[in-house]
Amino acid sequence: LVTDERSRSFMAFLGGEIAGFDTDRDIFITPYRGYHNPAVVEKGKCTNSKCVSDDGCGSIQIDIELEPGETRELVVLLGRGKAAVEGKKIVKQFGDIAKVKEEFEKVKQYWHGRIEGLSVCSPDAQFNSMMNMWSPFNCLITYAWSRMASLIYSGERDGLGYRDTVQDFMGVMQLIPEEAKKRLELMITGQGSTGGAMSIVMAFTHKPGKEKLPKEDEYRSDDCLWLFNAVPTYVKETGDIDFYNKVLPYADKGKATVLGHLRRAIEFNLKRTGKHGLPSGLFADWNDCLRLGTGGTSVFVALQVRFGLLTYIDICAMLGKLAEIKWANKELEKIDAKLDKFGWDGKWYVRAYKKSGEKIGSKENKYGSIYLNTQSWGIISGHADKYEGRAEQAMQSVNEKLACDYGLMLCAPPYDNMPVAEIRSIVFNKGVKENCGVFNHTQGWAVMAETMLGHGDRAFKYFYSSMPASFNDKAEIRGSEPYVYSQYTHSVFSPRYGASRVPWLTGAASWAYYAAIQYILGIRPDYKGLLIDPCIPADWKQFSVVRRFRNKTLNIKVVNPNGVQKGVKKITLNGQTIEGSLIPVSRMKKENDVIVEMG
Ligand code: IFM
């Protein structure tokens, strides 16, 4: 039988006689019942209802009798299109069990092919199950759906949100670099000639060169700065250095090389400054709840600009562009001078300035006196390194003020009784989302920062506390799948402490996976090869990783006889000692054995 639901989807069944069906959900379940006790199932008889306008469902009844121990295989086919046309075609094509099994095998191979590029064997079984299956799967699904599903569902919009989509690349680059490259190019063409981005890029109808840019105060101040993470990640994974010279159009007019697009991204923030000459916060920075406008400024964005400049210098050094390095170094000095003067609050970095000059994320504030992101990015951007003890102090403050059982809170203490204009997180309950929840998107940055300081125990502890699989024995607290990252977990300030909400549709998975692979396990692609720089718990005596890299396979075994958290003493590649921590791609064979001794 083939049945229609408004002629857009069909359902078919093979392997037994159809005794009835229902396509109207209300009739199938009946009022005041639920999915656990549909009336039709209790009665054991379908009503042959046909859904008209109301909520549809697909249910088919067959009557079979099984002897004890007997099994029967049945096939249910669901598809898009008209039952009489596409449905019939699909039934013809897949209408027997052997064919279905063959196709199912192909689907399994397809997914394994996508996640196979890297496998991990560490002393921690839960961590391994995340690294080998759930994290890459989560990253691929988040990448595929972007955040579209949530916003379509609530009737708001579709399209690729700029900042999230650009960050999603971090989790999939090693899995599907060529596919990711195409989307990366699309996103680069969503940058305007101003250097700022369209907040949404419509994947199917985007017309570079002809798009309308946001008004000045509608720009997000951080959007294009994420390209400094995504673009080098692509180039380092593939070795496609010429990508930096590829000419791509801007969204509205004109064109530039990819390197030119990157420069323009920095210029955007250098030109739009507010309080203390720091970059304006505009409509929002990473934090959607901070509406700082043109006068208010974001220290997080300033740190991202610093990271952008360092990355730009690194790229230009490789491409031999000396004049560009000179320009970037000058700008680096200028932004550092502002950060030096206005960024540090004594024991941690400030988060932002309102146009009035009032600080956000400062000891002077009653609410939100410390924020996580400027501490992590103080270290990731290299700024904290300029001052003896500052990086350690910033992360120590995080540990004292923001750590809870389920990860690091976005800020503390929670906002209460405030006007909504600038700190929009006040609309959330205490300990929820941007109002001091454990915002999972940000955990990877803190983990990266801790590994940069050589704190393997702490980095892993933070990673573990927000890792879905660590909730395997507390599912009733988490209340969502223990294998998928959620956007946030209720923090210690909420009566629902530990409940994790909004699974799948979050950048948390990408940064967590990236931080674990590249910074805890320390297997990090670079332009000329693969860098090995683990930062692990002291009690890990060894771990191994199989990593596909530029069509070669590396079987990497790391031993840690002295129980250190960081530091590589010796690396051998196929029996030969390597100088330093980089395994040059020029010395790799098709299959490679790598032994790394920490110490
Ligand atoms: O960074 C944003 C993201 O773009 C959408 N969800 C919330 C995050 C933090 O505000």
Image (cartoon, rainbow, N blue to C red):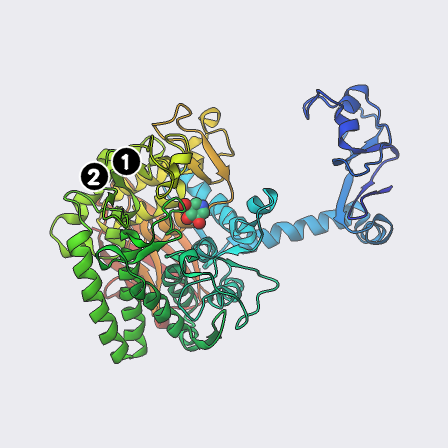
* Element at label 2: helix
Q: Would residue 282 be visible to someone looking at this image? A: yes
Alpha-carbon neighbours of circle 1 within 10 Å: few (<14), some, or many (≥20)? many
| Residue drawn at x 23%, y 68% as measured from the top left | 331
Disc 2: which residue? 397
Name the residue beneath numbered marker 1: 402
Q: How many marks?
A: 2
Question: Residue 547: horizontal and vertical position, in percent?
Answer: 42, 57
Taking the view exactly as shown, the residue that stands out farthest to the left is 388
* Residue 143: % across, % down: 52, 53
Which three-letter amino acid code belongs to the residue tagged 1?
Answer: Leu
Q: Mark 1 falls on what kind of element? A: loop
Q: Is residue 131 visible?
A: no
Q: Foreground: 320 or 205?
A: 205
Residue at 28% across / 45% down in the picture? 536
What amino acid type should be assigned to the residue bearing mark 2?
Ser
Q: Residues within 10 Å of mark 2 (few under 14, many from 20)?
A: some
Q: Is residue 237 left or right of residue 86?
A: left
